[in-house]
Amino acid sequence: MILVVFGYVSCKKDPIEDPHNHSLLNKTIDQIRSEIAGKWQFNRGCGYGISGYVCNNNWPQNDFVYFLPGDTVKRELNGNVSLYSKARITRYKSYSYTDSVYLFEIDLFYQWVMKEIKNDTLVIDEPGSQSTYYVIRQ
């Protein structure tokens, strides 16, 4: 008599985060700083206008934002620096997010939430104006 025993082994795998597509909303501030460090080129922006939700796909080609050490943010358009300031980073809670997130307040002009990375694109929400910007890593 041959005894055959079948066993069922369950291996629960921890989900592996895709390094090319992932949310930044649940990251620590140090993880966010690491992910966004460097030079990014504005590609397009979307927001509410007179005709509803619209996207500007004709963004100027020479519009860049740099996330530098010490929470410094530099914005450059056509080679001219239009912004060079230290961001004030605070926790922010609104109806748009299930948990509080980090808000980057840059001068009086910008309030950005680093939302996610999709391939080489950083998605930035601007909660006050309900706008979203798409910037490409350079």
Image: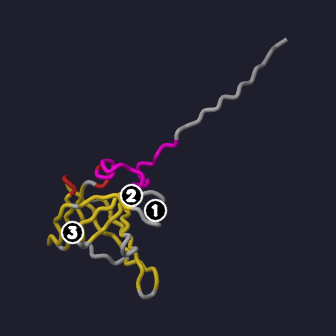
Q: Give the position of the C terminus as an image quadrant.
A: bottom left
Image-quadrant location for residue 3: top right
Residue 21 locus on image (x, y percent): 44, 54
Q: Is residue 30 above or below residue 105?
A: above
What residue did someone put label 2 on? 101
Binning the other alpha carbons within 10 Å of mark 2 as few (below 14), some (14 to 19) or many (20 upward) gives many
Relative depth, front residue between 62 and 65: 65
Q: Give the position of the N terminus as an image quadrant.
A: top right
**133 horizontally vs 105: left or right:** right
- Which element carries disc 3, helix, strand or loop? loop
Q: Amino acid at mark 2?
A: Val
- Look at the image and name its color scheme: secondary structure
Residue 28 among magenta residues? yes
In the rendered structure, are the residues bearing label 3 and label 2 in contact, judged by CB atoms less than 8 Å apart? no
Magenta range is 15-33
Q: Residue reaching furthest right?
A: 1
In the rendered structure, are the residues bearing label 2 and label 1 in contact, judged by CB atoms less than 8 Å apart? yes
Q: Residue at x 38, y 63 (%)?
A: 123
**53 horizontally vs 108: left or right:** right
- Which element carries disc 1, helix, strand or loop? loop
Circle on res. 107: 3
Residue 14 locus on image (x, y percent): 52, 39
Binning the other alpha carbons within 10 Å of mark 1 as few (below 14), some (14 to 19) or many (20 upward) gives few
- Which element carries disc 2, helix, strand or loop? strand
Binning the other alpha carbons within 10 Å of mark 3 as few (below 14), some (14 to 19) or many (20 upward) gives some
- Cα separation, mark 3 vs mark 2, equals 19 Å
Residue 53 locus on image (x, y percent): 45, 80
Q: Amino acid at mark 3?
A: Asp
What residue did someone put label 1 on? 97
Q: Residue at x 45, y 57 (%)?
A: 99
